[in-house]
Image (cartoon, rainbow, N blue to C red):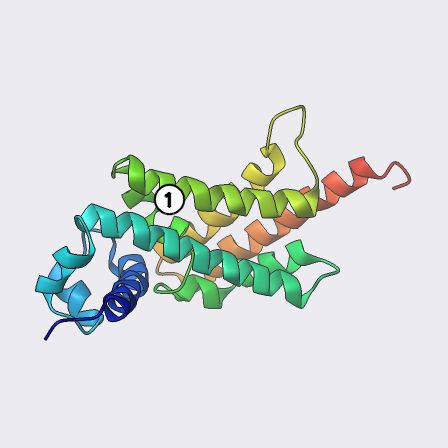
Amino acid sequence: MRVSRAQAEENRQTVIDVASRLFRRHGFDGIGLKDLMAGAGLTQGAFYKQFESKDDLVAQASRRALEDALDHWSAAAASRPDNPLSAVVDFYLSEGHCAERSDGCPVVALGSDAARHGPHVKESFQAGIQEYLDLLDSWIGGPEDGQPHSRSMAILSTMVGAVLLARAVNNEQMSAQFLEAAAKSVMAQAAATAAKADPRQ
């Protein structure tokens, strides 16, 4: 049976959505096309009608995963408009986010995988990371010493590294300590930045 263009596009978007979650859970090389397509309710034969290659899907799924992650950041920030950074830190450095592999941060889940892939995958990650940095900039102020995103890069590195380390250990107490220490560090950096910006403090 011939599939309509609308249905084919819907199927394509479903594959991208499913792949964005399965890649975060298993890694880019930890799941094959057959299982990816089965997860989307489609056959492997349909894959090549929708994507040029697995790398094509990896790049698009990475973009989708980063868009989803930014939606989580935006939702957290909107819940506490008086202090959006604190809201995002509470969400991102929570045990719940740490435990959520399929819908968690793709930079944590797939950053090392992306480093081993080609420019299209890295381009997807760079665009998403840039949006993270832009959001952080809007909450903590502009560049320091003329270096674009310097404060935001330090904060993002702290947050991503903490979740990565928290996931990498068996000891639940150590895992929680990584998250807590990072949260304190990020908020201290933000407070120091605010104090510099306001000479009355």
Nearer to me, 18 or 112: 18
Which quadrant holds residue 196? top right
**In which image quadrant can residue 172 be found?**
bottom left
Q: Residues within 10 Å of mark 1 (few under 14, many from 20)?
A: many
Single out the residue that lies furthest toward the top: 146
- Tell me, yes or no, if residue 174 can be seen here: no
Q: Position of residue 67 (x, y in %)?
A: 45, 56
* Quarter of the figure that contains the N terminus: bottom left
Q: Residue furthest right?
A: 200
Q: Is residue 33 above or below residue 54?
A: below
Q: Position of residue 73 (x, y in %)?
A: 55, 58
Is residue 55 found left or right of 159 in the rendered image?
left
Residue at 25% x, 39% y is 117
Residue at 32% in and 59% down: 20
Horizontal side of residue 62 vs 56, given as left or right: right
Secondary structure beneath dot 1 equals: helix
Residue indicated by mark 1: 124
Q: Quadrant of the C terminus?
A: top right
User: Which three-letter amino acid code belongs to the residue tagged 1?
Assistant: Ser
Whether residue 196 sits left or right of residue 187 in the image: it is: right
Q: Is residue 163 visible?
A: yes
Tell which of 39 and 177 is nearer to you.
Answer: 39
How many tags in the picture? Answer: 1
Q: Position of residue 108 (x, y in %)?
A: 39, 51
Residue in view at x 67 percent, y 24 percent? 145
The picture quadrant where one finds residue 83 is bottom right
Q: Is residue 111 above or below residue 73?
A: above
Residue 2: % across, % down:
12, 71
Residue drawn 39% across the image and 64% down it: 103
Q: Nearer the viewer, residue 122 or 107?
A: 122
